[in-house]
Structures are given as structure tokens and as C-alpha cells.
Amino acid sequence: MDTLPEELFDNILLYLKDLDPISLYKLKFTNKLFYKKINLIKNNYNKNYIIEKISFQNNINTLCYKGDLSIFKWLFKNNIVLTENNVVNLVSNNRIDILKECFKYNDILSKIFNNKYDILIFFNERLIKTESPLIIAGNNNHFDIVKLLLETNIFNNPFHKQIDILLESLIIKNHKTIITYIFVHHFEKIDNINYIIDNFIKNINNVDDIIYYLLLSKKIKINNSLILTCIDKGYNELCKYLYNNINNINNINNINNINIYEEHLFRIMKKENNELLDFFFKNILIV
């Protein structure tokens, strides 16, 4: 075939353009001229092609697992717009390389940031938990994809309204790294802060460093529930810090709600925490 004139190649290619996209793309490996000619093809398919060809959607899902980025660049250039199911498969397979390429095409971008994932507009928590790219990325501990979706500067980013649902899922999965990232960079987007923080501290171990950060950055305040939970978790140094800083609480009602002489002492004794008990008698009961 290498001996055939280029004009003949062009004629042959005209008849091959009706092939399905993947079959046509594979022909580029026939020889150098096919490689060049097929790479140059663009806008070869109608944008409804993938919707009308269910079997082709399944082929794309296979590519979402093991396909090279180059084939997706070629497909996108030829009007192949991924379905929502294809996007879910990209996220599940941690294909952030392809997702970033998707962001260059508005038709695909609208599938990723679909307003059906806006929990304030369509309050369907089951849909959010099972179909949202953000929640799927979080459940699979795909940190980079979570970061990409939350940090994409797009008007009314629907994923910003899913932070609470995401955190609940992350806490169950014990994905501490993503939780920390959200607390540092997206804390203001959390709606039910007290519930989330209490759930976080109670269900994930060794988070006293994160609690310190939240306190020092003034994202959370000292309260009775926080101290009691830290006693239960055995965060002795953190408990000492909390007790030493009770008087720094602005709201006098919050201070009065910290029932130091009863429930706290009972919790400490129940945990048989001699170190904290000693601190409590020397520094708190004398007040």
C-alpha cells in the first residue's frame, strides 16, 4: 500500500469515513500515510452519534478504563460527546487526564457539571450519592478528581452544594486526606458544620492535629460536645488545650454550658485516663 499514490488514499478514505469512530481510528496504524490522513480528520460525525449508538457507548466505557488519551482527543475533535454514564466511568477509573481534556469542550463540560446534581434545585439524595461524579470520586478516594471538580471555576458549580453529602461519605470510608483538603480549602461551603465536625471526630481516629488546625484558624469554637468527644478519643493534649482556652470563648453562655464539674469528670474517670484526671484535679477543680 505504501506504493499507492496519495490521491488514491484520499479516495479510499472517503469510503472509510462511514465506519464507526473506533474502527476508523484504528486504521491509522495501517501505514504512515493512513496515520497522517486519519489524524487530520475532524468533525466527521454528528453530535448525536453516541446517543443513537448504544453499543458504541459501551465501547467508550471500555476505553475509559484502558484507552489512551490520544484516541479521546481524536474522538472529541470528531464531535463524539461523552454520555453521563461515560463520565461516571472516567471518574470511577480515575482518568483525570481524559477529564481535563473533556473540559475543553462545552458539550461535555455540561454533562459533567449537570444541574441535575444541584441538590438545592433537585433534592434527590439518592441520585446525588449514586450518579454524582464528585461523590463517586470521593468514594473511590480519587483525590485529584475531587480537587479538580471542586476547584473548577464554573458558574453555579453544582458540586459545591454537595460538600456535606461528600463529607458524610468520606467519613464512612475513612478518606482522611480528602476530608482534610475540604476543611482547609472549602470549609465555608459546609452547611451543617456542627454535625459534620462531631461525626468526623467520633468516627475517624488520630484527627487531633486537624482539630487543632480548625481551632487555631477559628473555623470551629470550643464547646461542650467537642471537649467530651476529645475525652472519649483520648486526645489528652488537645483536652488540656481546650480547658486552658475555655475563658477565651466569647459567648458566656457557651462557657456555662461546659459542665466541667460533672459530666467531664465522669467521662474521664470512665475512660480511666489518669493523665487527664490528674490535670483535671490540679487545674480545673481548683478554679
Image: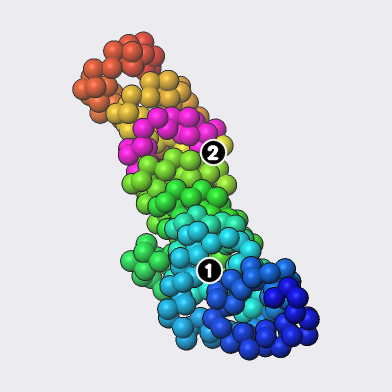
Residue sitting nearer the eye, 225 or 252: 225
Q: Based on the picture, tell me whether residue 207 belongs to the magenta stretch.
A: yes
Quarter location, residue 242: top left
| In this view, the mark in front (1 or 2) | 1
Mark 1 and mark 2 in contact? Answer it, CB < 8 Å: no
Position of the C terminus, as image quadrant, is top left
User: Looking at this rendering, what residue extends furthest in the front direction?
Assistant: 3
| Residue 238 image position (x, y, % from top left) | 43, 25
Instruction: Report the Cα–Cα distance between label 1 and label 2.
Output: 34 Å
Which residue carries the number 1 mark? 112
Residue 217 visible at all: yes
Q: Based on the picture, tell me whether residue 180 belongs to the magenta stretch.
A: no
Q: Is residue 111 left or right of residue 135?
A: right
Residue sitting nearer the eye, 195 or 37: 37
Residue name at image x 62 percent, y 80 percent: 79
| Residue 89 image position (x, y, % from top left) | 45, 64
Circle 2 sits in a helix, a strand or a loop, which is it? loop
- Magenta part of the chain: 199-216
Amino acid type indicated by mark 1: Ile
Q: Earlier in the sequence, mark 1 or mark 2?
A: 1
Circle 1 sits in a helix, a strand or a loop, which is it? helix
Residue name at image x 53 percent, y 84 percent: 49
Residue 155 visible at all: no
| Residue 144 image position (x, y, % from top left) | 55, 50
